[in-house]
Amino acid sequence: MKVLESVRIGWRSITSHKLRSALTTLGVIIGIASVIVFMVLGGAFQEDILGDIDSENDPVMQVSVQQSGGGFGGQQPIERPTFTESDVEAVGAIDGVEYVAPFGPLDVSHVDHDGQRLRLVSGTTTVPELFHEGGVFPLVEGQTFAGEGEAVVNVRFQRHFEGNASVGEEVTMRLTDGRTETLTIAGVVEEEVSTQTRPAIYVPTDPYYTSTIETQDGTTERAYQSMLVRATSVQGLSDVREAVQTYMDTESDARQEVPEDHEIRVQTIQDLIDQLTGFLDQITIFIGGIAAISLVVGSIGIANIMIVSVTERTREIGIMKAVGAKNRDIIQLFLLESVILGAIGALFGVILGIGIGYLVVGYLGWPMVYPLNWIGIAVAVGILVGVISGLYPAWRAARVDPIEALRRE
Amino acid sequence: MMVGTDDGTSEMTPSNGPAETDGGVVAARNVGRTYYMGEPVHALSDLSLTLENGSFTAVMGPSGSGKSTLMNLLGCLDTPDEGTIEIDGRSVGELSGKQRATLRGTKIGFVFQTFNLMPRLTAAENVTLPMVFNDVVEEGRRERAENLLGRVGLGDRLDHAPNELSGGQRQRVAIARALANEPTLILADEPTGNLDSDTGAEIMDLFEELHAEGRTIMMVTHERHIAEHAERIVHLLDGELERIEELDSVGREEGGSRGDGA
């Protein structure tokens, strides 16, 4: 029997139970659609964060303490003072290093401006070079802070205040340790290269950073959580990275401070992007995997309906066998019917998934991505679901004894 | 009126049986069939029967006499435990399931009491079905189905679904379907059982016409007056051949009966 012929007969029986067939495919539609939605969202999020980072031309690297080994997803740098002032100076002296920007956390309670209060603001101390032109943290407005009493804020910070907190205006920053500082906004910076989406304020290390640790040789020094190292050229990046890593592992004060199972990592922007991408991919696949569970449910639905259908059509199977249908023909007929159901489910699932993804991504303001490989996988999975859920019913159909079947009233 | 072999479809239909050794197209030799339902039930034992080319045989007997079993065996739906069934010189017992399915599709045409049409297919599609399963080339199928339906008087009901047809019309579709692959043997199981007597008579007329065309027919029935349309009646009892009753044409036409031992 020709496959096309089976498709025609299978299609006939699918359309003769329209509601039932529609409800049967619903499971697959929902399963495929949710997988596609998560893939679209994952891809769009990644695109949104990483889309316009020019990793090739930024000869910078981050030095931080992270847990050893791979672990699940990305590693978050640990938050404790580790890199001393001496380390910063030593790294700054390495050949090919343009500047070192140590990051110190500031526990900001809130920031007041123009009678409005901003809570939940991330405060960081660093050096003015960080905001130099052509760097990782390009200013969109104003200039970098020159010293005490000045600050750089990010766009999100600026927008928080009605009428914006513009360059030249004053804000009052209250720290959790009780200090109150009045700062003039010197510049506004775009978002950071991270998932940091909170309003942020950056102030000079001097005089605002105060955390110290006692080093192995007994001196008390200011110490930072992490630092950013900029090389003088892209070409020199890997050598500098090597040198910094070597210094950190053999001579630094920081190496004494690294807790068990942790290590100092020197990562370029590309490393960070790779790490973040890997992390996002894993999350996306994980959530997509959960969504795929509904596919299993959908395939059980198809199998269930196909078994019912075989029972209902036992007599028809008997008739077909009486007029010369081989077991293979019967298997082909029922298998194709469930494959058609699976494929229809996949098709509508992809359309629905892309549609929902498009709406949500549009709402969030992320760029739309079409996860083509996942669409391909979804359709293949839909067909596979059809095959798998049709196998047993088709086998049962083929085993129908025509004598018994034809005797049925 | 005639299902011609000159309608351009003859190449795709199997030729009627070759000349076989003992002159029968279909032969059962010492056939036995035993079912095991807890204990063995001898549905048929040591039955021999030859259906000559062009013959019209009726099979009668009370329930449980083995009528259905005989039909299933001759229709290649079942295989005997003992003895052999030969169709066109081929022994059915030696065939694989697939070969039997092919043989069934090409050599046998079934007509059932309950018509057994595919409910979602139209009359013409039902008639086409045996050709579909036996891989008859697609061109000409529809035309052949139309010819056959015209042959049984349903030329104007081609695209009607079974539930749009009367019982008699459905049985006519079933007969047309049975003829689809030019079978060696037409097996009819109580073909008038679900029909009123007038319609039943029309169906029997049709069978007589088919017989007159030289087709080989075996019909199971429990109604004497239906059986008398045949040339001979095979009486079964308790799974054994009781006697074969030859009917002469006069007796058949008068509908009379004439007991005659085999």
Image (cartoon, coloured by chain):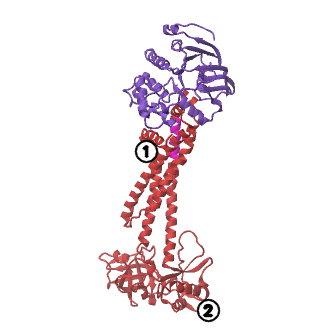
Asked if the residue at tag 2 contacts the one at tag 1, i.e. Cβ–Cβ closer than 8 Å, the answer is no
- Output the chain of dot 2: A
The number of callouts visible is: 2
Q: Quadrant of the C terminus of chain B?
A: top right
Is residue A150 inside the magenta stretch? no
Left or right of B127: which side holds B96?
Answer: right
In the picture of the structure, the residue carrying the numbered disc 1 is A22
Q: Residues within 10 Å of mark 1 (few under 14, many from 20)?
A: some
The numbered mark, 1 or 2, whose residue comes first in the sequence reads 1
Please give the letter of the chain rendered in red: A
Residue A283 position in % (x across, y down): 51, 65
Q: Is residue A337 above or below residue A111?
A: above
| Label 2 sits on residue | A217
Quadrant housing the N terminus of chain B: top left
Picture coordinates of residue A109 (x, y %)? 43, 78
Between residue A89 and residue A370, name the one nearer to us. Answer: A370
Q: Amino acid at mark 1?
A: Ala
Q: Is B213 located above or below residue A213 in the figure?
A: above
**Main SS of the magenta segment?**
helix
Where residue B204 appears, x then y in whole percent?
Answer: 47, 17
Chain the render paints purple: B
Residue A43 appears in the picture as rendered = yes
Q: Position of residue A176 (x, y in %)?
A: 45, 80
User: Is residue A322 visible in the rendered structure shown here?
Assistant: no
Range of magenta residues: A300-312
Q: Which amino acid does the dot numbered 2 rest on?
A: Asp
In the rendered structure, the residue with mark 1 lies on which chain?
A
Q: What's the distance in space between the residues labelled 1 and 2, CA to CA?
A: 75 Å
- Residue A2's place in the image compared with A250, above or below, is above
User: Which residue appears at 60% of the width and 75% of the height?
Assistant: A68
